[in-house]
Image (cartoon, helix red, strand yellow):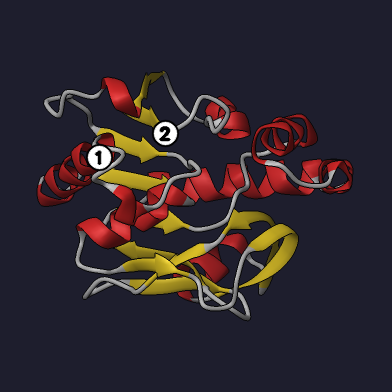
């Protein structure tokens, strides 16, 4: 399978997800031309907002790639900003979250197919976001927190607001770049095995959509 993984920022990569995927073509979003060929598309996170398309023109290219992949019934995965781009591309709306940022290890509640596949009611995940989205028409909600939607699917497109791909080293890089308390990265270290196990299961779920 030819998988295209798009990075909106150099420090927000596939992380541990990469070890569970077949060969991946990785590209920075700003290098996209819009005519890229893929059998499956992955879009990762970044510090920008979907509503900042005038400033970050590559976001529009990503939205068009999502629309193209969706129309062709291709498998699509979006993580954090990537999930918001899927929501926007397929008819939802991305806004600043009314309940503020979610940062750190948190529990999300699972629903439907994802709950059945994971065989868990809840999942420990890493959060780092302030924006949220409304669900596109025909979307199925798969996870939520007390404040925001956390995962959804539309046909073969899967959006997850949270991060399972991280380890303490990656989070430490984010803190150095974006600001924050290093204790957050230290806390993540205690959950690395759990996050990686969940990442493996998430990719398995996505690959059978």
Q: Secondary structure at mark 2?
A: loop
Q: Locate residue 159 relative to residue 102 in the image: left or right.
A: left
> Mark 2: few, some, or many residues within 10 Å (few <14, many ≥20)?
many
Across and down, in percent, residue 12 comes to 54, 33
Q: Locate residue 183 relative to residue 105 in the image: left or right.
A: right
Across and down, in percent, residue 30 comes to 31, 25
Across and down, in percent, residue 191 comes to 82, 48
Across and down, in percent, residue 90 comes to 20, 61
Q: Residue at x 12, y 43 (%)?
A: 68
Q: Is residue 129 above or below residue 27?
A: below
Q: Secondary structure at mark 1?
A: helix
| Residue 1 visible | no
Chain-order first, disc 1 or disc 2 = 2
Residue farthest to the bottom, as pictured: 146
Q: Is residue 101 above or below residue 206?
A: below
| Image quadrant in which the N terminus is located | top left
- Tell me how far mark 1 sits from mark 2, CA to CA: 10 Å
Q: Residue at x 56, y 34 (%)?
A: 17
Asked if the residue under mark 2 is in contact with the one under mark 1, i.e. CB atoms within 8 Å, the reply is yes
| Residue 197 visible | yes
Q: Residue at x 39, y 68 (%)?
A: 95
Q: Is residue 84 above or below residue 39?
A: below
Question: Which residue is nearer to you in this view: 12 or 49?
Answer: 49
> Mark 1: few, some, or many residues within 10 Å (few <14, many ≥20)?
many
Q: Which mark is residue 8?
A: 2
Q: Is residue 209 above or below residue 172?
A: below
Q: Locate residue 64 relative to residue 143 in the image: left or right.
A: left
Q: Which residue is mark 1?
A: 62
Q: Quadrant of residue 135?
A: bottom left
């Amino acid at each position: 399978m030819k998988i295209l993984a798009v990075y909106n920022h150099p420090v927000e990569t596939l992380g541990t997800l990469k070890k569970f995927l077949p060969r991946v073509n990785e590209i920075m979003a700003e290098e996209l031309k819009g005519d890229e060929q893929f059998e499956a598309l992955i879009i990762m996170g970044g510090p920008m907002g979907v509503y900042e398309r005038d400033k970050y023109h590559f976001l529009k290219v990503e939205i068009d790639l999502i629309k193209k992949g969706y129309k062709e019934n291709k498998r699509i995965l979006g993580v954090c900003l990537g999930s918001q781009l899927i929501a926007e591309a397929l008819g939802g709306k991305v806004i600043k979250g009314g309940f503020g940022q979610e940062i750190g290890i948190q529990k999300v509640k699972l629903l439907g197919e994802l709950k059945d596949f994971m065989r868990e009611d809840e999942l420990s995940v890493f959060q780092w976001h302030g924006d949220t989205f409304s669900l596109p028409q025909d979307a199925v909600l798969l996870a939520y927190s007390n404040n925001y939607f956390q995962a959804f699917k539309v046909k073969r497109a899967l959006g997850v607001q949270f991060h399972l791909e991280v380890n303490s080293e990656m989070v430490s890089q984010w803190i150095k770049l974006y600001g924050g308390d290093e204790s957050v990265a230290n806390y993540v270290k205690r959950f690395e095995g759990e996050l990686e196990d969940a990442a493996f299961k998430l990719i398995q779920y996505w690959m059978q959509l």
